[in-house]
């Protein structure tokens, strides 16, 4: 533990407020859920509108950048939001994020060409990237770790709703109204979120203390992340993996990560304090979530390809077929969150959940071609429920292991590496699909069926390898979960601060 953490400044200074009641907590949650919904919805609503956008703006070549640039900017700024919320307060940074998101959405809606839209989406990602991490940190501020799991269902519900509602709204707006409506809708939603957050978050206890922002470290982290994500996004799709552009990007990213690691050791107050990353609980929980959620993200990206290319479903039906995978995480997270408040050994349920998820994924790998669509849906629901049990445990244990004034940094760091893990595993799944189907270079996923047919390749066998890779991902998540120290969860906010300082 950093000696600075033992100073009086490390103690929460909530102005002598009593512990918040459940009603007060729910009021605060209402202020952050809509903000989270804005960020989550914008990751899903754009997909079904992309063909229309490309046609109307007359630029299909750069269409993927509308999605890629949002991923790049939102992932890269997540740790920055965590650090800033530790320095200037959750409420202030949450409101700043909402304002930036609204401005970015307005710019997207008014975009006259593809370049302007891509740049506006980057600005929108800068605003949306911190909303989820700051929202999770706010919950950590107001709910003791032992009781925190019961509130995780609210967040799981936000993601499930956005995942199901986003593609439907995006397609409807693009087809029946105009593609810009998917951005205009953020105006009233964003203003409502700002008003609710501005009022309800005044009740928040205050844990921030003055920090110096490491601008050089922030620049190195953002640049290293963007370069790495570019390599993962382009590799095997825009350029072959062994091509000079991809190898150069990966090499450049490695150099930047090394420089960032050196900066963390030398900076007077680094962007990510070494004590956070060296904390064994934070490290193991983050790695477990990284591989677990990364594998889940990979499945959500490539299962629609499986449904369309192997099972012959339409685009709309393949979206509906993902519902069990989306909905099951809410069930699993609810079970796990409520169990954490009642049992001492809270790792047992997620351990069993990951084992079940691995077994169910094995069924898809070995017998997926022989299963009916209904059976596949049941298996996906089982996988999702099993994985869902991991999410509350990894986040709550991370927040339980750090001091209140480092909560934002730890939460932002965990979300950052989880997104990075998702990008890495999506790239891995993509490499398996493209190499297995005989598609190379800049070919699109629409060419999968044609390329496989010409090569005499059975795409079902290719996706069996994807499911085997998913088992490996879940297995790594399980290994890090087993290595996670099962510390007692603290029961009150002030006691939490005292216990961390005493560690």
Image: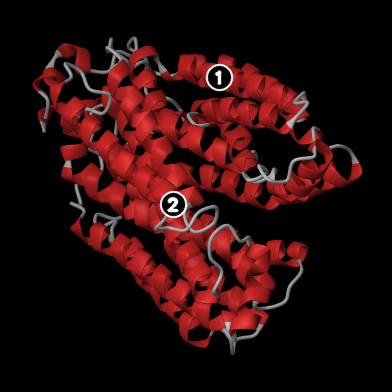
- Image quadrant in which the C terminus is located: top left
> Could you tell me which residue is drawn at 13 percent across and 18 percent down?
4
What distance separates the C-alpha of mark 1 from that of mark 2? 33 Å
Identity of the residue drawn at 41% across and 38% down: 227
- Locate residue 408, reporting x and y percent: 35, 27
Quarter of the view holding residue 454: bottom right
The secondary structure type at the circle numbered 2 is helix
Which mark is first along the chain, 2 or 1?
1
Q: Nearer the viewer, mark 1 or mark 2?
A: 2
Depicted 306 relative to depicted 144: above or below: below
Residue 77 falls left or right of residue 299: left
- In the visual, does 166 lie left or right of 299? right
Task: Say if 399 sits above or below 456 in the image.
Answer: above
Residue 247 screen position, x and y as percent: 36, 50
Where does the image place residue 52, in percent across and percent down from the top left? 81, 45
Give the labeled residue for mark 2.
422
Q: Residues within 10 Å of mark 2 (few under 14, many from 20)?
A: many
How many numbered circles does the render carry? 2
| Depth order, front residue of 74/29 | 74
Residue in the foreground of this view, choosing between 366 and 37 = 366
Which label sits on residue 200?
A: 1
Q: Is residue 63 above or below residue 122?
A: below
**Image quadrant of residue 136?**
top left
Q: Is residue 216 left or right of residue 383?
A: left
């Amino acid at each position: 533990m950093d000696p600075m953490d033992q100073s009086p400044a490390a103690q929460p200074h909530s102005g002598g407020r009593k512990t918040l009641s459940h009603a007060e907590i729910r009021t605060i949650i209402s202020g952050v859920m809509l903000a989270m919904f804005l960020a989550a919805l914008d990751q899903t609503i754009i997909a079904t509108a992309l063909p229309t956008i490309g046609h109307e703006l007359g630029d299909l070549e750069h269409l993927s950048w509308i999605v890629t640039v949002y991923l790049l900017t939102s992932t890269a700024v997540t740790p920055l939001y965590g650090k800033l919320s530790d320095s200037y307060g959750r409420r202030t940074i949450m409101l700043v994020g909402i304002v930036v998101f609204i401005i970015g959405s307005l710019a997207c809606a008014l975009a006259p060409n593809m370049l302007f839209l891509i740049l506006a989406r980057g600005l929108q990602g800068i605003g949306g990237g911190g909303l989820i991490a700051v929202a999770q940190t706010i919950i950590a501020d107001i709910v003791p770790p032992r009781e925190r799991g019961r509130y995780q269902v609210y967040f799981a519900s936000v993601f499930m709703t956005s995942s199901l509602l986003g593609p439907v709204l995006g397609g409807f707006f693009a087809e029946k109204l105009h593609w810009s409506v998917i951005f205009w809708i953020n105006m009233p939603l964003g203003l409502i979120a700002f008003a609710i957050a501005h009022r309800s978050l005044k009740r928040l206890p205050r844990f921030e203390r003055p920090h110096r922002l490491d601008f050089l470290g922030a620049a190195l982290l953002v640049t290293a992340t963007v370069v790495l994500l570019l390599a993962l996004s382009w590799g095997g799709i825009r350029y072959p993996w062994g091509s000079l552009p991809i190898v150069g990007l990966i090499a450049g990213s490695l150099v930047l990560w090394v420089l960032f690691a050196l900066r963390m050791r030398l900076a007077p107050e680094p962007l990510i304090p070494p004590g956070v990353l060296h904390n064994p609980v934070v490290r193991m929980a983050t790695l477990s979530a990284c591989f677990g959620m990364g594998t889940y993200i990979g499945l959500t990206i490539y299962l629609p390809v499986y449904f369309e290319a192997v099972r012959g479903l339409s685009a709309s039906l393949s979206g509906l077929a993902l519902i069990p995978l989306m909905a099951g995480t809410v069930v699993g997270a609810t079970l796990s969150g409520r169990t954490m408040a009642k049992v001492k050994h809270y790792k047992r349920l997620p351990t069993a959940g990951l084992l079940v998820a691995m077994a169910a994924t094995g069924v898809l790998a070995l017998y997926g071609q022989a299963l009916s669509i209904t059976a596949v849906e049941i298996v996906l629901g089982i996988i999702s429920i099993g994985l869902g049990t991991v999410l509350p445990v990894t986040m709550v244990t991370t927040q339980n292991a750090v001091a209140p004034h480092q909560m934002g940094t730890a939460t932002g760091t965990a979300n950052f590496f989880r997104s990075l893990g998702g990008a890495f595993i999506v790239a891995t799944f993509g490499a398996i699909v493209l190499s297995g189907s005989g598609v190379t270079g800049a070919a699109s996923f629409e060419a999968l069926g044609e390329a496989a047919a010409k090569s005499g390749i059975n795409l079902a066998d290719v996706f069996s390898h994807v499911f085997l890779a998913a088992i490996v991902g879940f297995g790594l998540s399980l290994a890090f979960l087993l290595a996670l120290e099962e510390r007692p969860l603290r029961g009150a906010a002030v006691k939490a601060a005292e216990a961390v300082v005493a560690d």
